[in-house]
Amino acid sequence: MRLLDALALVASGAGAGAMNALAGGGTILTFPALLLLGESARVANATSTVALLPGAAASLAGYRREVSTHRHWLGTLVVPSLLGGAAGSLLLLATPEKIFARLAPWLVLFATALFAFQSWRAGRRAPGSAPAPGGGRRGAVAWVAQFGVALYGGYFGAGIGILMLVVLGYLGLTDIHAMNGLKNFFGICINAVAAAIFVAGGLVDWPAALVVLAGAVAGGWTGAHFGRWIGPQRARAAVVVIGTLVGALLLLRGI
């Protein structure tokens, strides 16, 4: 691997780690970078998934204070995250990427619009704790929605962070930093299952993955602290901006 190629992968990994810490969509940086270096689409997707996993863990560590006060949410969506991630990654091994890839920009843009609306509603409500998770229609809808997000995440993955923020907003969470931390936890669940299947399927380019990983860990940790530093309102605005840019880039690239 040439030095310039390695630097490009480190930079894409750092940017992706920071984006995932703030909102999601980091795959849109690492996936095209790997494609430009000559990887096939499936190998680029699998390598990106494996490489960004430690960065998500670093970002989660950066949000550990906020997540620790919302531990009761961790068990709510972990099962659909694991099941959907496994199903989506197996789907990638068995089918072409075109169907999900064509849906990607519209999913991201729709999710961003929903999140912007939820942010506006959250800003108009009096501050307070989110309702406790429970059963009923809302919990069932959230479970199915998270399974769908995880299915898409295991298959392709660009923008799953934004989609998960929408699911968490539907459940009643309003603290953007806690939402980002929980989102990163569920993203780790999705991608860990997918990564294991991709590794078993022999789709990972390990030299490229390790280079991207180095940048992603630094970017994930930095992005989490940056999100806390800029405050909840600016962090929410960053989510909307990033989501819009990710959707537009996906449309422009014809993915």
Image (cartoon, helix red, strand yellow):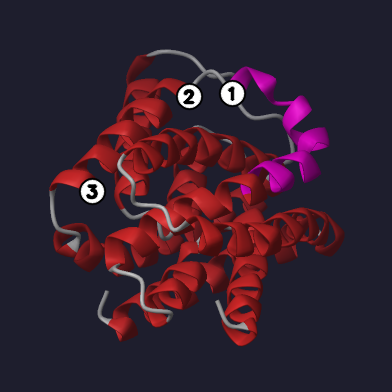
Q: Is residue 40 left or right of residue 120?
A: left
Q: Is residue 52 left or right of residue 114?
A: right
Report helix, strand or loop for mark 2. helix
Asked whether the beta carbons under mark 3 and mark 2 sit within 8 Å of each other, the answer is no
Q: From mark 3 to mark 2, how far is it between C-alphas?
A: 21 Å
For marks 3 and 1, the one nearer the N-term is 1
Q: Nearer the viewer, residue 114 or 161?
A: 161
Asked whether the beta carbons under mark 2 and mark 1 sit within 8 Å of each other, the answer is yes
Q: Magenta residues, as a range? A: 56-73
Q: Is residue 40 above or below residue 45?
A: below
* x and y, in percent, of residue 71 in the image: 68, 21
Specify the amino acid type for callout 1.
Answer: Leu
* Residue drawn at (62%, 64%) of the image: 211
Q: Quadrant of residue 179?
A: top right
Q: Which mark is residue 83?
A: none
Q: Nearer the viewer, residue 78 or 145?
A: 78
Q: Quadrant of the N terminus?
A: bottom right
Q: Is residue 136 above or below residue 251?
A: above
Residue at numbered disc 1: 74
Q: Residues within 10 Å of mark 1 (few under 14, many from 20)?
A: some
Report helix, strand or loop for mark 3. helix
Q: Going by the picture, which residue comes out furthest to the front?
A: 1
Whether residue 58 is in magenta: the answer is yes
* Residue drawn at (30%, 30%) of the image: 144
Residue at numbered disc 2: 78
* x and y, in percent, of residue 173 in the image: 60, 37
Specify the amino acid type for callout 3.
Answer: Leu
Q: Quadrant of residue 223?
A: bottom right
Say if residue 125 shows up in the picture.
Answer: no
* Residue drawn at (69%, 60%) of the image: 214
Q: Going by the picture, which residue comes out furthest to the top?
A: 135
